[in-house]
Amino acid sequence: MRDKKAAAVAYTPGEYAPRVLARGRGETAEALCRIAARNGVPVVESPDLANSLMALNPFDSIPEEYWTAVAEILRFVYETRGNDELH
């Protein structure tokens, strides 16, 4: 069985780039998914992006090469939660 990986990301309007809030593998990844579910945040599966974000530390800016993928995920999350703005 593959080691599960997860990353929590966010974008604050006015900041240069989205950031990694937390990331982890195994039990930490499971905990991140449980926290998201408890808070009504959809969990989006993107194994390739999760692998890439594992190289970053919490609060690191996400490199530009991943902005499009992260923006698509954030848009889905905000639309699913009924938010009008990306914040």
Image (cartoon, rainbow, N blue to C red):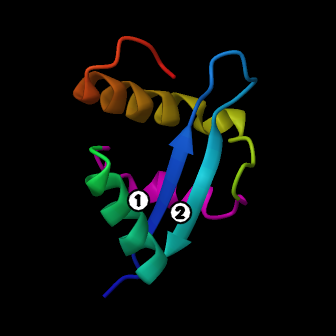
**Residue type for callout 1:** Pro
**Residue type for callout 2:** Asn
Horizontal side, residue 23 vs residue 59: left or right? left
On the image, the x and y values in percent for residue 47 come to 40, 59
Residue closest to the far bottom? 1
Is residue 12 in view from this perspective? yes
Kind of element beneath mark 2: helix
Residue 75 placement: quadrant: top left
Residue drawn at 43 percent across, 31 percent down = 74
Are the residues flagged by discs 1 and 2 in contact, CB closer than 8 Å?
yes
Mark 1 and mark 2: span between their CA atoms?
A: 6 Å
Kind of element beneath mark 1: helix
On the image, the x and y values in percent for residue 29 come to 43, 71
Residue 57 placement: quadrant: bottom right
Residue drawn at 72 percent across, 49 percent down = 59
Q: Mark 1 points at which residue?
A: 47
Residue closest to the far top? 84
Horizontal side, residue 13 vs residue 32: left or right? right
Look at the image and tell me in which quarter the N terminus lies. bottom left
Is residue 26 in view from this perspective? no
Residue 85 placement: quadrant: top left
Residue drawn at 31 percent across, 65 percent down = 34
Magenta highlight on residue 44: yes
**Mark 2 surroundings within 10 Å by alpha-carbon count, few (fewer than 14), some (14 through 19), many (20 or more):** some
Would you place residue 31 above or below residue 78 in this image?
Answer: below
Horizontal side, residue 64 vs residue 85: left or right? right
**Residue toward you, 79 or 65:** 79
Q: Mark 2 points at which residue?
A: 51
Horizontal side, residue 26 vs residue 41: left or right? right
Q: What stretch is highlighted in magenta?
A: 41-57
